[in-house]
Image (tube, coloured by chain):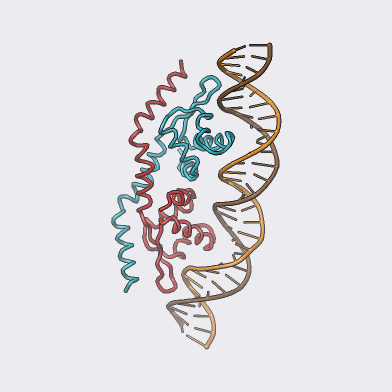
Chain colours: A red, B cyan, C orange, D brown
DNA sequence: ATATTATGCAGGTAAATGCCTGCATGTCAA
DNA sequence: TTGACATGCAGGCATTTACCTGCATAATAT
């Protein structure tokens, strides 16, 4: 599980949009997802490819269609590694900031 | 508060490293941060600039030095908007996935 | 069988990114 | 005051990125 790929995948607004769309309705086809995104199908394919590489999306084929499903696990991992870490220190970090800003005013 | 800038800022490993360094010791100078990063001071400045633009880092000048402080608030916002959303649906999303994978095996 | 539909794959391009070098400015200390 | 130190600013360059067009392949429907 490569955190870097997850962050890279989340860095693009189109890809975050795709995750949102899949969250509204999981298991959509490529064509279906394209309808909500103002760009060519090929571009959407590339974005979905990155999401899949980051393991944020899993796919299955149903006949000639490709279904896309969200995998929420990597997001959870990001939370554990990144958000929680700063969350637990949130108050002390904000305290450092406050002290410094007060020094500046004086 | 622009979520896009926050995600873009987090997308680079060097910038995540900088946040980690500041988490270990808040309020470090530019020169100090450079010692732990194998690149020129100017490059580090650029990275810190993006972190500052995303409001993840706040700076103050102390004489000729520039001090850097983490601001944990944007990370919290990202959590609220992105992680929690998928977390609450985590089980049902994984359920969708499981069902689909089972269909494929048969 | 053939037309239609859904997707895959291979370049091509303009802009963004991440790194660098070189020089300028401002602050401290001897 | 002058040399050393900390940072700022401008520009250049190679790579990556996010789009696109054009064509190929595979599955369904008539």
* Rendered location of residue B60, percent (x, y): 49, 25
- The percent position of residue A85, horizontal first and vertical second, equals 36, 38
Q: At x 40% / y 71%, what residue is drawn?
A: A62
* Number of numbered tags placed on the structure image: 0
Q: Is residue B69 left or right of residue C11?
A: left
Instruction: Determine the residue positioned at 48% across, 45% down.
Output: B11
Where, by quadrant of the figure, is residue A94 drawn?
A: top left
Q: If the image is split into quadrants, where does the N terminus of chain B sit?
A: top left
Image coordinates of residue B69 in percent, x first then y, are: 45, 29
Give the percent coordinates (x, y) of residue B80: 36, 43
Name the foreground residue: A94 vs B47: B47
At x 43%, y 67%, the residue is A66
Quarter in which the C terminus of chain B is drawn? bottom left
Find residue A64 and report its image quarter. Answer: bottom left
Which of the 4 image quarters holds residue B44?
A: top right
Residue in the picture at 37% in, 50% down: A75
User: Eyeballing the image, is A64 above or below C22?
Assistant: below
Above or below, comparing residue D25 to residue B37 in the picture: below
For the residue pair A80 and B56, the one nearer the viewer reads as A80
Q: Is residue A14 above or below residue B105?
A: above
């Amino acid at each position: 599980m490569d955190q870097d790929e997850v962050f890279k995948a989340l860095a693009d607004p189109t890809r975050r949009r795709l995750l949102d769309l899949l969250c509204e309705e999981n298991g959509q086809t490529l064509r279906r997802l394209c309808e909500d995104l103002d760009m060519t199908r090929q571009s959407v394919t590339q974005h979905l490819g990155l999401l899949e590489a980051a393991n944020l999306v899993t796919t299955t084929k149903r006949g000639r269609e490709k279904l896309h499903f969200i995998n929420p696990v990597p997001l959870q991992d990001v939370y554990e590694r990144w958000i929680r870490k700063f969350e637990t220190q949130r108050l002390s970090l904000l305290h450092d900031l406050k002290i410094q800003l007060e020094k500046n005013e004086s």
